Amino acid sequence: MKAIEIRNKYLKFFENHGHKVIPSSPLIPENDPSVLFTTAGMQPLVPYLLGEKHPEGKRLTDYQKCLRTNDIDEVGDNRHLTYFEMLGNWSLGDYFKEESIQMSYDFLTKELGIPAEKISVTCFAGDEDCPRDELTASCWEKAGIPKDRIYFYGKDDNWWIAGEEGPCGPDTEMFYDTGKPKCSDNCQPSCDCGKYVEIWNNVFMEYYKKDGKYTKLEQKNVDTGLGLERMAMLLQGKQTPFDTELFSPVMERLQSLAKNDDIASRRIVAEHMRASMMIICDGGRPSNLDRGYILRRLIRRMTRHLNKLQIDLNELPNLIELNVETLKEMYPELESHKQEIKDVIVAEKDKFMKTLNNGEREFNKVINRLKNQGINKIDGKTIFNLYETYGFPPEVTKDLATENGFEVDLSEVDKLFKEHQEKSRMGSDQKFKGGLAEQNEKTIAYHTATHLLNAALKKVIGPSSHQRGSNITTERMRFDFNCDHKLTPEEKQAAEDLVNEWIKADLPVTVETMKKEDALKSGAECMFIEKYPDEVTVYTIGNVSKELCGGPHVKHTGELGHFKIVKEEASSQGVRRIKAILE
């Protein structure tokens, strides 16, 4: 069964069970306080999981484009992906465990045709904070899973919470038995031997954690996530996602072009190319900051491995063309952004080739110095520094060293890379943590301030100025907007003064639900119109701002305090960035 068929079956199934199909949000989130990219299906729905009314009702379903970079260095093995698609369904205070579990069981067995005996499930075992989730287990038994395939695990495996504080609850995970023999008598879903593969996760948000204590939520929610690539792989009887139709055309083309074939390198090129294309399609551009740096890293890593495969880099536009053709049924937007995708990737590739040339010059300085000292071995720290400072890949250093009669100490390189990856992963965990715990009075105030700044910039720069992204913490707001020049001191002061004028006026912030086309006719602005469902939420601030937005916001602008721009800088080509605080 192809991936597109699985997606369509999923959406149709839940639509038939009273769910409204909502569009996928872009990979680059709008007004999300916690992340660089959309990392999960629940992320765009945070305000509604916290109690705001969704314009499409209490039952929702969608496919969500997601990007996670915690394990970017692991891509190349048989399973890791940075970009993936998550299928999800939600109950916002409507059905709960029994109906959720029955629908999951019916979809897996009846719609996808998975034999019930291939499914095992896990439930929360309970602890001193919250009781054992016997209800979930009994719901699975009622649905058709026998007791001997129902397992109980602790919080590490079967509990979900976004941070230290916020909505949380037990989850239940579904596992597919691949048919491989058990690795031991104790082999079960928690084992990583490959016999059991997790395919779906249903989170039951029924508690709220604060100051280490758990209380029951008034609005209980269900949030589920099913990974499309993994499910396609299993249903097609493939060994890896790279063997499915999502990747096989480009994998085969790479193999035919490669003069030095390597399966890991082909996977890296195929995966990073797809991820880069999706980011660019949703407005991302390479830079040295945040999500721009992630995109730059993906393109450069892809380029390195094209070099390793000894594939002519002039083939890049053709490879992109093939990928668009392969994926356009699933993501039609790729077709309309094809030239833009080519231009961005090729330009970044060209920049990176200059980096490689600079790195080679530095490498030559290193070996000349070592020759003068009578040393014929390059230590790991030097190799790592060439990578960290100049972006010069260790495998290139190794090849050039061998050609020049030098040995290399790769054991120390591995150690330094592991330390580097651990720091990166810790940083990613902070950047990419879930958003539910981040909604508070300060972030809500900053969220409202982004609307005022957006309106102010339209007056100061002109109506062609539009928001390109934002990031909010409890300490500050960051706002990206398209602009072809550095703001003058007068322009910055004028924008700041306008925002403060509107704050001082204590303008009312009102919200209403309307048809999307009516919202656009009324002059409401939004970043990505295609991400919104047919019914939308529109926030209006006095007579100065009107935007499609999920909220939440303050009730009056007077609650914001004093607005101050602390920095204005370039974000990427044609995009400027303002950092501001509320005092």
Image: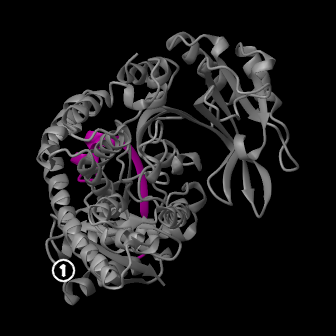
- Point out residue 427 in the picture as x, y percentages from the top left corner: 52, 65
Seen from the viewer's position, the closer of residues 341 and 359 is: 359
Q: Where is 429 relative to 17, above or below?
A: below
Q: Where is 155 relative to 328, above or below?
A: below
Give the farthest residue toward the front.
Answer: 374
Q: How is the image coloured?
A: one colour
- Point out residue 231 in the picture as x, y percentages from the top left corner: 49, 25
Q: Where is 204 relative to 384, above or below?
A: above
Seen from the viewer's position, the closer of residues 53 and 291 is: 291
The kind of residue on which mark 1 rests is: Lys
Q: Residue at x 60, y 10 (%)?
A: 115
- Label 1: few (<14), some or many (≥20) within 10 Å? some
Q: Which quarter of the picture shows residue 240?
A: top left
Q: Look at the image and give the residue range highlighted in magenta.
A: 505-531
Give the farthest residue toward the bottom.
Answer: 489
The residue tagged with tag 1: helix, strand or loop?
loop
Q: Is residue 571 magenta?
A: no
Is residue 555 shown to the viewer in this render? yes
- Point out residue 341 in the picture as x, y percentages from the top left corner: 18, 48
Location of mark 1 (residue): 486
- Point out residue 16 in the picture as x, y percentages from the top left corner: 48, 17
All told, the count of numbered labels is 1
Q: Which quarter of the picture shows residue 489?
A: bottom left
Seen from the viewer's position, the closer of residues 130 and 527 is: 130
Q: Residue at x 80, y 18 (%)?
A: 147
Q: Residue at x 75, y 20 (%)?
A: 149
Is residue 525 shown to the viewer in this render? no
Q: Is residue 520 magenta?
A: yes
Q: Where is 46 relative to 192, above or below?
A: below
Relative horizontal placement of residue 122, taking residue 328 as reference (left or right): right
- Of the 4 image quadrants, the one containing the N terminus is top left
Q: Residue at x 23, y 51 (%)?
A: 307
